[in-house]
Image: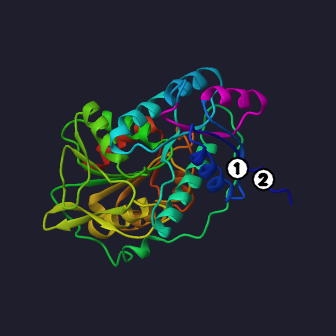
Amino acid sequence: MTMPKPIRVLVIDDSASVRQAMTAILSADPEIEVIAAAADPFAAARHIQEEIPDVITLDVEMPRMDGITFLRKLMSQRPIPVVMCSSLVEEGSDTLLQALDAGAVDVILKPRVGVADHLAEAHLMIRETVKGAARARLGARRQRTTAPAQKLTADAVLPPPTGRAMSRTTEMVVAIGASTGGTEALREVLEALPANSPGIVIVQHMPESFTRAFARRLDGLCQIDVKEAEDGDTVMRGRALIAPGGLRHTMLERQGARYVVSVREGPLVSRHRPSVDVLFRSAARNAGANAVGIILTGMGDDGARGLLEMKQAGARTFAQDEATSIVFGMPKEAIARGAADKVIPLGSVARELLHATAR
């Protein structure tokens, strides 16, 4: 039986210690091979002439040429999936958003010193992000099969739904999950919504502190208000709450006739935190038929089980189709489980959302 070829990665960073750390982290996965590590874009260009990588990890701030300038040149000449890598957190988030606009598939934070568990989780997320980038649709690319690692389910954070939630409420609520390619998919969906749209809670897999800048960016583009979720925030019409990335899960809870979000610590679920499965399960438990669940582009299966639980609780459920997904992983798994009432292109998501919540 022929083993699939490893994902070939080119690491670009001006720091020798970061190049060594990234090489060690990625090489620890047998499905990834670091073919070269370059100190700047000029050295990287020479490597690309010799061997075209499947994925590039690219530092933002470098001498001679910054990462975003190199990214734009690369995308215009020879598109390759690029994951931006930065030590900047809040103060550099706007720059990383520019990188996504310029064509980067995803963003990660550079390896940093911390407790063992945090280091292990951070390394896992770096490897998973690179694997997701390798599947990104940037023209015709071969598909790879990746055996899923053992992972926790939403049981680790929240018990399964025990029955139907209260059947009637004055408001509907929408839960959306996305990963690789989701930043632009969410922008397209939220920009198309009117100011009086139903309340929305979103999990988009992102590094910690990056979601705040992402929410600010969307808030400036959309008719609805968009903000990073804080514990106790009310889910209300005309507002979308984006789960903070990194260290906590975001869940939907009911307080009387209104919905609020709960932001809590917990282990990785489906290899992610925040996890779409956790959000969807909480919607199934606390909103039932008053909810709409939507799963968008992304690698892996986070959200597939939770979307099925929402459907079984009476919610309307949708999955993005393959043709418009950057990575047809999460939607594919949800469809395979029978979790989606309807499979729709990205351009139809806003319309279907409004129709489903207007009943």
Q: Examine the image and state in which quarter residue 280 appears.
A: bottom left
Determine whether 6 is above or below 276 in the image: above
Q: Residues within 10 Å of mark 2 (few under 14, many from 20)?
A: few
Q: How many marks?
A: 2
What kind of residue is marked 1? Arg
Label 2 sits on a secondary structure element that is: loop
CB atoms at circles 2 and 1 under 8 Å apart? yes
Between 147 and 42, the residue placed more toward the observer is 42
Which residue is farthest right?
Answer: 1
Residue beneath disc 2: 4
Q: Residues within 10 Å of mark 1 (few under 14, many from 20)?
A: some
Where are the magenta residues, as a range?
41-62
Is any part of residue 135 visible from this angle? no
Determine whether 215 is above or below 26 in the image: above
Residue beneath disc 1: 144
Q: Examine the image and state in which quarter residue 81 appears.
A: top right
Horizontal and vertical percent position of residue 86: 47, 42
Horizontal and vertical percent position of residue 257: 13, 64
Question: Residue at image x 55%, y 53%?
Answer: 126
What is the CA distance from the residue labelled 2 to the residue labelled 1? 7 Å
Between 122 and 82, the residue placed more toward the observer is 122
Which residue is farthest left?
Answer: 256
Horizontal and vertical percent position of residue 316: 36, 56
